[in-house]
Image: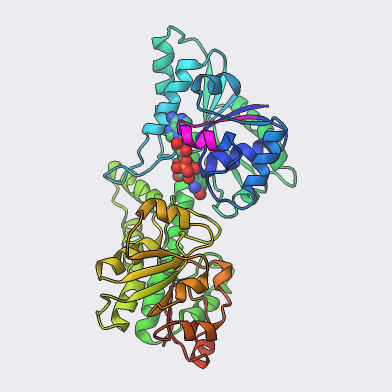
Amino acid sequence: MKVTIFGSGYVGLVSGACLADVGNDVVCVDIDEDKIRRLNGGEVPIFEPGLDQLIKRNKEANRLAFTTDLAAGVAHGLFQFIAVGTPPDEDGSADLQYVLSVAASIGEHMNEYKVIIDKSTVPVGTADRVRNRVKEVLAGRGMSGLEFDVVSNPEFLKEGDAIDDFMKPDRIVVGTDNPRTTELLRALYGPFNRNHDRLIAMDIRSAELTKYAANAMLATKISFMNELANIAEKVGADIEHVRIGIGSDPRIGYHFIYPGIGYGGSCFPKDVQALERSAREHGYPTRILEAVETVNYRQKEILFDKINGHFNGDLAGRTIALWGLSFKPNTDDMREAPSRVLMEALWKAGARVQAHDPAAMEETARIYGERDDLLLCDSPEAALQGADALAVATEWKVFRSPDFERIRQALKEPVIFDGRNLYDPLLLKRSGLVHYSIGRPR
Ligand SMILES: NC(=O)c1ccc[n+]([C@@H]2O[C@H](COP(=O)([O-])OP(=O)(O)OC[C@H]3O[C@@H](n4cnc5c(N)ncnc54)[C@H](O)[C@@H]3O)[C@@H](O)[C@H]2O)c1
């Protein structure tokens, strides 16, 4: 089948490569010329495990192509996926300018029936706006009679596991307003749906809300656990015992209840905000979502507070080694990463940061540029050299079982601020290291 994907970011590239890998003829379109030039030159502009091989294989088989030519993209696919960014507007609502600009391009260039599929995360009602935009543009061309359908097909992939998530999805949510498009989408997703039927068909508005509901629920779990971790610290309990204790209840489960230094990334923060905003627009103030955000905002500051407290507010001239920059492991994505809040607070207090991350150092350099108070180091060990203390902000595997003796020798003060509860407090105590973690007694 012929597929066009607008937007070659985390979602567009993974979707395009996976759809090509099962035999479809896919064209990925992006307005970012540099990105398309790099993709055509064999480079993959983002870090996602396995993606480079998948793209290479399908490009070589002529099933996957990249272009900035919007007209060629529209002409190519029966399926026109919109997978562009939906960043927050100044007021927190989703900025739909990129989505609607793609809709306008489709209206401008289409000459036959198309299925337009919203894969971007968008507020309820966006499919109607996409449909109206396409109609307006078609009317301007005197082609009002041209048929098309709009589908909501939100994406649930996780960065770091994105290919597996796309190839073996938990669910494929398809919101349509007629059975014909549901069947077309069922055929397109057939190869990812063989083991058992995972396609969940529903109306368009429910599909749009399902994506926000999923992210808001996950963000709520994180903020809930972080709130409990803070209570545990106050009352002298250990949140890691509490976590196991509650996770054993199948109604709660062990997934996604790790305490830490807050959620980041390109999805949870903006999606919680956008849902909140959209509910308010409909006259419904959202008590839970507001609390989820407030708790998360505060949690991102917690590691700095612990560091600052340990050094009695005297951080000027100190150097903090930082392990982990990306908002979670296995990605280079730094959007809303807790490490940024920590680094910025440390800099404000006059401290230097020596950081290492397995994938996000290029992105960190792009965001912050050259500065005297940031040194990006080639290895976790190099980041420790001459530092006063170590802080861990991302739970990359490589940080999980370090040589504590080496850490103790390299640091000026034997202290670790463990923002992800990676380390066993007893083991660290025995290694002569002072250990601050989240929600556990010291
Ligand atoms: N990143 C994730 O893990 C994830 C998961 C599920 C859903 N989503 C949602 O998917 C959408 C895309 O997210 P992302 O992380 O892939 O974004 P991204 O920022 O990585 O990529 C978006 C791409 O769209 C391109 N673009 C903008 N306007 C365009 C246009 N008119 N035509 C063609 N390309 C255009 C940009 O240049 C950019 O390359 C968002 O709505 C996001 O919320 C993201």
User: Image height check: is 245 above or below 121?
Assistant: below
Percent x, y of residue 414: 43, 86
Q: Relative to residue 411, is residue 249 drawn left or right?
A: right
Looking at the picture, tell me which residue is in the foreground, 347 or 105. Answer: 347
Question: Residue at image x 46%, y 18%?
Answer: 107
Residue located farthest toward the right when viewing the structure as drawn: 195
Percent x, y of residue 157: 56, 49
Can residue 201 be seen in this snapshot?
yes
User: Image height check: is 412 above or below 178?
Assistant: below
Colour mode?
A: rainbow
Percent x, y of residue 204: 49, 34
Question: Residue at image x 54%, y 78%?
Answer: 245
Percent x, y of residue 270: 38, 49
User: Image height check: is 51 above or below 356?
Assistant: above
Can residue 210 be seen in this snapshot?
no
Does the magenta-highlighted stretch encompass residue 31? Answer: yes
Q: Relative to residue 405, is residue 340 drawn left or right?
A: left
Question: Residue at image x 68%, y 27%?
Answer: 1
Residue located farthest toward the top when viewing the structure as drawn: 142
Does the magenta-highlighted stretch encompass residue 220? Answer: no
Instruction: Give the quadrant of the C terminus.
Output: bottom left
Q: Relative to residue 26, is residue 95 drawn left or right?
A: left
Q: What is the tally of numbered marks visible in this picture? A: 0
Q: On the image, which quarter does residue 43 sit in?
A: top right
Looking at the picture, tell me which residue is in the foreground, 416 or 272. Answer: 416
Please state the extent of the stretch shown in magenta in the rendering: 26-38
